[in-house]
C-alpha cells in the first residue's frame, strides 16, 4: 500500500503545513456515544426478537459457542490492538506512518491468520479423531475467529488515528447488517442458533470487505520497512495484554461454559445468558464508549503533559460519569427486572435478577477502570496481566463453589465479587500520581439522590401498577423528579456540563 491523501493529512503536507488539530475528548466522546447509542438501540431491537424466537436452550447453545469464539479471537490477536494504540506515531510523518503500518498492522494481521490456521487445524484433527465429526456451530465459529480478529485490528487503527467519525459509521453499519441478516435468518429460515451464526457470517464478510478497502486507502505498508525490532517491541508490549485480554474474556464469559459443565443444562445457560446479554448492552454504551474515546486521548495527554495532565483529564470525565453510573445503578434496582420482562416476555423473567446484578457490576467497574488507568501509560503490562489473572482465578473458584449451591445466580454473584476484587487490585497497583477517584461531593450528591429514588420507588411499589410498561413509565418519571432534577439543582458544574453538551449536539 502506498501513501495516501489521508496519510499525508495526518502527517502534514510537503509545504510544511501542520496537521489538522485532533478532536478533543469531548468530541470523541460524543461521536462514540452516538455510535454506541445506535448500537445499543439496534441491540434493543434484536434482543427481544431473539429471546422470543429462541428458547432458553437454543440461546444457551448460542452463547456457549460465542464464548469459545471470543476466547479464540483474543488469543490469535497477540495483543496487536493494544500495541497499535500505544505505538501509533501521533507526531510522525509519512515515513513513520508507513513503518507503523508495516510492523504493527500488516505483520500483526499476518501473524494472527497464521496462528489461527495452526490452532484451527489442530482442533479439527483432534475433534474429528475423538468424535468422528464436528458440530456445524463449531465450524462456523472457527471460520469467524480470523474475520473478527482482523476486523478488530483494523478498527483499532481507526481509533488510534482518532478517526472516530469513520469508526462511528463503520460500527453502526456493521451492527445494522448483523441485525438484518441475523433476524432475517431466524424469522424466515429457522429459529435456531445455527441461523444466527449464518447471518453473522454474511454480515462480517461484508464489513471486512469495506475495511480492506479502507486499509488500502489509508494505511501505507512496504516490505522494505519490515523492522524485526519494532515488531518485537510491539509483541513485548502486546502479548501480556493479549494474555490479559484472554484472561478478561475468561472472567467475563467462562461462567456460561461452567454452568453447562457443572449443571449439564443448556436451558440454565440460556437463563443466565439472557440476563447477561442485556447487561452487556449497558457495557456497550458506558464502558466501550469511554474506552474508545479515552484511550487514545489519554496516551497523547500523558506524552504531552505527564501525570498531572492525566489526572486533570480523569477529573473532567469522572464528574459526569459518577452521576451517570449512579443513575444506572439506581434504575436497575428500581426497574431492571421490569425492563427485561418488557423486552423478553414473562417466560424469561428468571433472567431479571441476573440482569440487575451483572448490570450493576459492570457499570460500577466502568467508572473505576477510568479512575485506576495508569499501568499501560507506564508500559507495565505484566502487572495488568497479573491482576486480571488473580480476578479470573477468584471468579473460577467462586463459580465452582456457588453454581452447585445457587445455580445460575451463583455465577452472577461470582462475577460481582471478582469484578470488585479487580477494582481494588487495580487501584492498589496504579502508579503514584495517576489514580483519581470521583470527588467526594459529587459522589455524595449522586448517592444521596439515588438512595432517595430507590427508597421511594420500592416503598410505593410503583404505585401498585401491574402492567410492566406502566411500571417502567412510573420509574422514568420518578427518576426525573427524584434524581435528575435534584442532582442538577445541587451541582452547578453538572449544569455547566449539560449546557456544554447541549451546545455541541445542537
Image: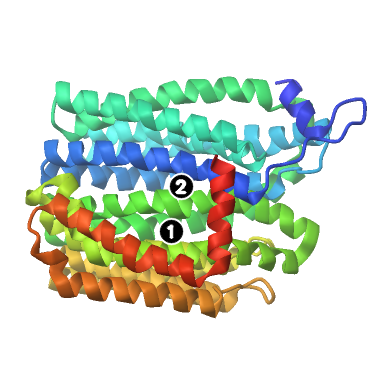
Q: Is residue 4 visible?
A: no
Residue that numbered label 1 is attached to: 248
**SS under mark 2:** helix
Q: Is residue 497 visible?
A: yes
Q: Foreground: 27 or 500?
A: 500
Image-based side of 480 in relation to 241, left or right? left
Query: What colouring method underlies this structural image?
Result: rainbow
Lower sequence index among marks 1 and 2: 2
Question: If the image is split into quadrants, where does the C terminus sit?
Answer: top right
Dots 1 and 2: beta carbons under 8 Å? Answer: yes
**SS under mark 1:** helix
Q: Foreground: 416 or 113?
A: 416
Residue that numbered label 2 is attached to: 74
Q: Quadrant of residue 192?
A: top left
Q: Quadrant of residue 138?
A: top left
User: Where 265 sits versus 43, above or below?
Assistant: below
Q: What residue lies at 64% left-to-right and 21% top-to-bottom?
A: 216
Q: Position of residue 275 (x, y in %)?
A: 22, 54
Q: Quadrant of residue 480?
A: bottom left
Q: What residue lies at 27% left-to-right and 31% top-to-bottom?
A: 197
Amino acid at each position: 500500500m502506498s501513501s495516501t491523501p489521508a496519510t499525508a493529512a495526518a502527517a502534514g503536507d510537503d509545504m510544511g503545513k501542520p496537521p489538522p488539530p485532533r478532536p478533543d475528548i469531548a468530541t470523541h466522546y460524543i461521536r462514540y456515544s452516538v455510535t454506541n447509542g445506535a448500537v445499543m438501540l439496534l441491540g434493543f431491537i434484536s434482543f427481544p426478537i431473539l429471546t422470543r424466537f429462541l428458547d432458553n436452550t437454543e440461546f444457551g447453545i448460542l452463547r456457549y459457542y460465542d464464548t469459545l469464539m471470543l476466547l479464540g479471537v483474543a488469543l490469535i490477536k497477540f495483543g496487536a490492538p493494544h500495541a497499535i494504540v500505544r505505538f501509533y506515531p501521533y507526531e510522525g510523518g509519512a515515513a513513520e506512518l508507513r513503518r507503523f503500518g508495516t510492523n504493527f498492522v500488516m505483520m500483526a494481521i499476518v501473524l494472527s491468520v497464521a496462528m489461527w490456521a495452526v490452532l484451527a487445524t489442530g482442533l479439527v484433527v483432534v475433534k474429528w479423531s475423538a468424535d468422528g465429526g464436528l458440530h456445524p456451530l463449531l465450524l462456523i465459529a472457527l471460520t469467524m475467529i480470523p474475520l473478527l480478529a482482523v476486523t478488530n485490528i483494523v478498527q483499532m487503527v481507526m481509533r488510534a488515528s482518532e478517526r472516530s467519525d469513520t469508526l462511528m459509521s463503520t460500527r453502526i453499519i456493521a451492527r445494522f447488517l448483523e441485525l438484518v441478516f441475523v433476524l432475517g435468518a431466524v424469522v424466515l429460515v429457522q429459529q435456531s442458533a445455527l441461523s444466527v451464526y449464518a447471518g453473522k457470517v454474511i454480515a462480517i464478510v461484508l464489513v471486512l470487505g469495506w475495511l480492506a478497502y479502507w486499509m488500502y486507502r489509508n494505511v501505507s505498508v512496504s516490505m522494505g520497512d519490515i523492522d524485526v525490532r519494532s515488531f518485537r517491541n510491539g509483541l513485548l508490549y502486546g502479548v501480556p495484554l493479549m494474555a490479559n485480554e484472554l484472561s478478561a474474556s475468561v472472567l467475563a464469559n467462562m461462567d456460561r461454559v461452567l454452568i453447562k459443565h457443572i449443571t449439564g443444562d443448556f436451558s440454565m445457560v440460556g437463563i443466565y445468558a439472557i440476563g447477561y446479554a442485556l447487561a452487556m448492552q449497558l457495557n456497550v454504551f458506558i464502558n466501550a464508549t469511554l474506552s474508545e474515546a479515552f484511550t487514545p486521548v489519554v496516551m497523547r495527554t500523558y506524552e504531552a503533559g505527564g501525570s498531572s495532565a492525566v489526572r486533570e483529564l480523569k477529573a473532567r470525565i469522572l464528574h459526569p460519569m459518577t452521576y451517570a453510573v449512579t443513575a444506572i445503578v439506581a434504575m436497575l434496582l428500581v426497574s431492571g427486572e421490569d425492563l427485561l420482562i418488557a423486552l423478553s416476555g414473562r417466560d424469561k423473567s428468571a433472567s431479571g435478577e441476573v440482569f440487575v446484578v451483572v448490570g450493576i457490576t459492570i457499570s460500577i467497574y466502568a467508572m473505576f477502570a477510568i479512575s485506576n488507568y495508569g499501568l499501560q501509560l507506564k508500559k507495565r503490562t505484566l502487572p495488568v496481566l497479573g491482576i486480571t489473572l488473580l480476578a479470573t482465578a477468584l471468579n473460577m473458584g467462586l463459580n465452582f463453589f456457588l453454581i452447585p449451591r445457587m445455580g445460575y445466580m451463583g455465577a452472577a454473584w461470582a462475577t460481582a465479587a471478582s469484578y470488585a476484587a479487580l477494582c481494588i487490585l487495580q487501584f492498589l497497583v496504579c502508579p503514584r500520581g495517576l489514580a483519581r477517584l470521583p470527588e467526594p461531593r459529587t459522589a455524595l450528591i449522586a448517592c444521596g439522590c439515588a438512595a432517595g429514588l430507590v427508597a421511594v420507588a420500592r416503598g410505593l411499589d410503583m404505585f401498585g401498577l401491574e402492567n410492566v410498561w406502566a411500571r417502567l413509565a412510573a420509574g422514568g418519571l420518578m427518576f426525573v423528579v427524584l434524581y435528575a432534577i435534584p442532582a442538577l439543582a445541587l451541582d452547578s458544574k453538572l449544569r455547566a456540563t449539560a449546557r456544554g453538551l447541549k451546545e455541541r449536539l445542537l
